[in-house]
Amino acid sequence: MDYKKAGVDIEAGYRSVELMKKFVNETARPEMLGGIGGFSGAFSLAGIKDMEKPTLVSGTDGVGTKLKLAFLMDKHDTVGIDCVAMCVNDIACAGGEPLFFLDYIACGKNYPEKIAMIVKGVAEGCKQAGAALIGGETAEMPGFYPEDEYDLAGFSVGIVDEKDLITGALIQPGDALIGIGSSGIHSNGFSLVRRVFSMSEEALRRHNADLGTTLGEALLTPTKIYVKALKEVKQAGVTIRGCSHITGGGFYENIPRMLPDGVHARVQKNSYEVPVIFRMLQSLGCIEERIMYNTYNMGIGMVLAVGQEDVDKTIAAIGRADEHAFVIGEVVSGDKGVTLC
């Protein structure tokens, strides 16, 4: 008896590392010290010496049951983008610049080519965010996970000068709410998605004229990464007074998280076009509208609060990042919360 016969293939682990190296190297930043394969990842902080009060911001998250779609479609090169996005978007929400990222993959059996495809997606997400992939872990856990399944989670650290932290404290009545478009369902609410849509391979691979693609491809569309868009807004000289990443909990849970006491967010539902995938989900699942807005992003992945005088500059800056922005509402006096009308 040896470790391989017990279900853990050390040689496959070595091969996984070799296959993923080229993807990891593409995310390198000058601050990276050392290479892949060490016991820890090292990252120089020499570049932050000019900040008045350098402040670390961090985020950690996973992909959730969206992975079930990846298993069914046998498509593993995009869920890594989701994993990075869920972490770095939260950092960007605080005004931070993501510096580096680490991933954790736990699997029932290490198939090196599959692991490499997952890491390829992670590396692509890191490139979109400007973060270095400085380390990670692949844990082969036979008997804990089925052989053809895995879990994926990650952790990111960013930096911001304390004076530039986005806390929501500056939000005041009259401010505009700017929504940045999502790419679809992103990475939340897939337990409900899998109850509503047929999860057969035939249904997932069938072309849907309304979607312009297959249902499976539409559902696996990776989460938007908004780091570049928020950076463009900052470089345009706009003070982002509040920022909300629309994840699990949708509009009703996430928008109030950025609000100080004494103000209320009023969102106009007809201010932008809700993507087809949400309309299909709501209709087929007979889901109440409030539940949809309390579960999904409904086409808006990030909401910013800015002064009315900065609306045009904000929308133009977001456009320079190749993203679409909409004025979706305003801030009014009242109890902290959100009204959709």
Image (spheres, helix red, strand yellow):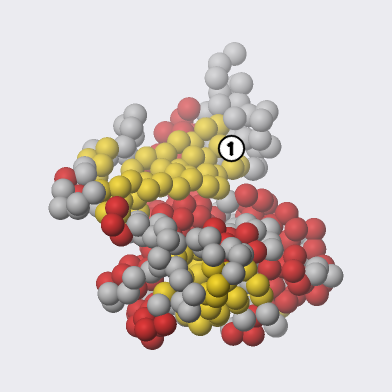
Q: Position of residue 280 (x, y in %)?
A: 75, 75
The structure residue drawn at horizontal position 63% and vertical position 29%, both measured from the top left corner, is 142
The structure residue drawn at horizontal position 55% and vertical position 19%, both measured from the top left corner, is 3
Q: Position of residue 107 (x, y in %)?
A: 58, 37
129 relative to 24, above or below:
below
* Quarter of the figure with residue 314: bottom left
91 relative to 149, above or below:
below
Q: Position of residue 44 (x, y in %)?
A: 21, 42
Residue furthest right in the image: 286
Q: Quadrant of the C terminus?
A: bottom right
Residue on which disc 1 sits:
107
Residue furthest top in the image: 1
Q: Secondary structure at mark 1?
A: strand
Q: Could you tell me if residue 177 is visible in this image?
A: no
| Along the viewing direction, whichever of 50 and 46 lies nearer the viewer | 50
| Along the viewing direction, whichever of 47 and 165 lies nearer the viewer | 165
User: 227 left or right of 138?
Assistant: left
Q: Position of residue 255 (x, y in %)?
A: 56, 64
User: 109 left or right of 310?
Assistant: right
User: 207 left or right of 200?
Assistant: left
Q: Could you tell me if residue 271 is visible in this image?
A: yes
| Along the viewing direction, whichever of 339 and 159 lies nearer the viewer | 339
**Mark 1 neighbour density, 10 Å: few (under 14) some (14–19) many (20 or more):** many
Q: Quadrant of the N terminus?
A: top right
What amino acid type should be assigned to the residue bearing mark 1? Cys
| Along the viewing direction, whichever of 119 and 261 lies nearer the viewer | 261
The structure residue drawn at horizontal position 58% and vertical position 51%, both measured from the top left corner, is 63
The structure residue drawn at horizontal position 68% and vertical position 28%, both measured from the top left corner, is 143
